[in-house]
């Protein structure tokens, strides 16, 4: 059986494209699995978000307005400039104490970043 040369290169190119797609997809999936296994932090979608503000309520007032459930966890996310974690840690501990006073489970996640930022997420996940 003889295949026309004008069609054979198209079949080869289609096969190579499919192989490249599958290899790339496999690589992405294994990279994601590796990241998931390295990070044991599993955060569910937030039920509510809190960001400290001079014009807004403090954390105790904000928590009082929420429908609190014993399964909820408040995760305090802190981004701090490299070399300056002490101030960020102090702010996070203040929020943690307020949440404990309200009877809410708390965890703190600190990340070195280019700028300072702090916020809290109230979600149905366990600190673990």
Image: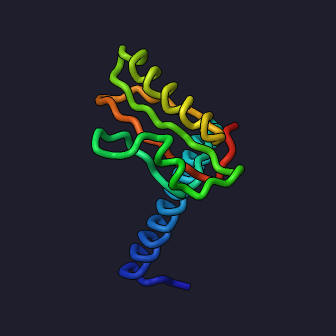
Q: Eyeballing the image, is 31 above or below 14?
A: above
Residue at position x 42%, y 40% from top? 58
- Residue 109 x, y percent position in the rendering: 52, 32
Residue 52 placement: quadrant: top left
Viewport quadrant of the N terminus: bottom right
User: In the image, 76: left or right of 123?
Assistant: left
When the figure is inspected, residue 32 is found, relative to residue 105, above or below; the finding is below
What is the x, y in percent for residue 100?
A: 62, 34
x and y percentages locating residue 86 in the rendered image: 42, 15
Q: How many marks?
A: 0
Identify the residue at image location x=53%, y=50%: 64
**In x, y percent, where is residue 70?**
71, 50
Q: Nearer the viewer, residue 40 or 45?
A: 45
Q: Is residue 23 visible?
A: no
Q: Quadrant of residue 119?
A: top left
Name the residue nearer the viewer: 17 or 39.
Answer: 39
Q: Which color scheme is applied? A: rainbow
In the figure, 25 relative to 27: above or below? below
Q: Residue at x 35, y 34 (%)?
A: 117
Of the pair 53 and 22, the residue shown nearer to us: 53
Asked if residue 80 shows in the view, the reply is: yes
Quadrant housing the C terminus:
top right
């Amino acid at each position: 059986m003889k295949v026309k040369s004008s069609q054979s290169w198209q079949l080869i190119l289609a096969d190579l494209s499919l192989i490249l797609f599958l290899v790339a997809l496999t690589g992405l999936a294994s990279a994601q699995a590796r990241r998931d296994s390295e990070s044991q932090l599993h955060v569910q979608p937030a039920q509510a978000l809190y960001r400290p503000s001079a014009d807004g309520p403090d954390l105790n007032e904000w928590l009082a307005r929420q429908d609190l459930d014993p399964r909820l966890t408040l995760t305090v996310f802190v981004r701090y400039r490299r070399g300056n974690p002490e101030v960020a840690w102090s702010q996070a501990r203040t929020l943690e104490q307020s949440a404990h006073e309200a009877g809410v489970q708390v965890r703190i996640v600190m990340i070195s970043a280019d700028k300072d930022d702090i916020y809290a997420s109230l979600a149905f996940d366990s600190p673990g």
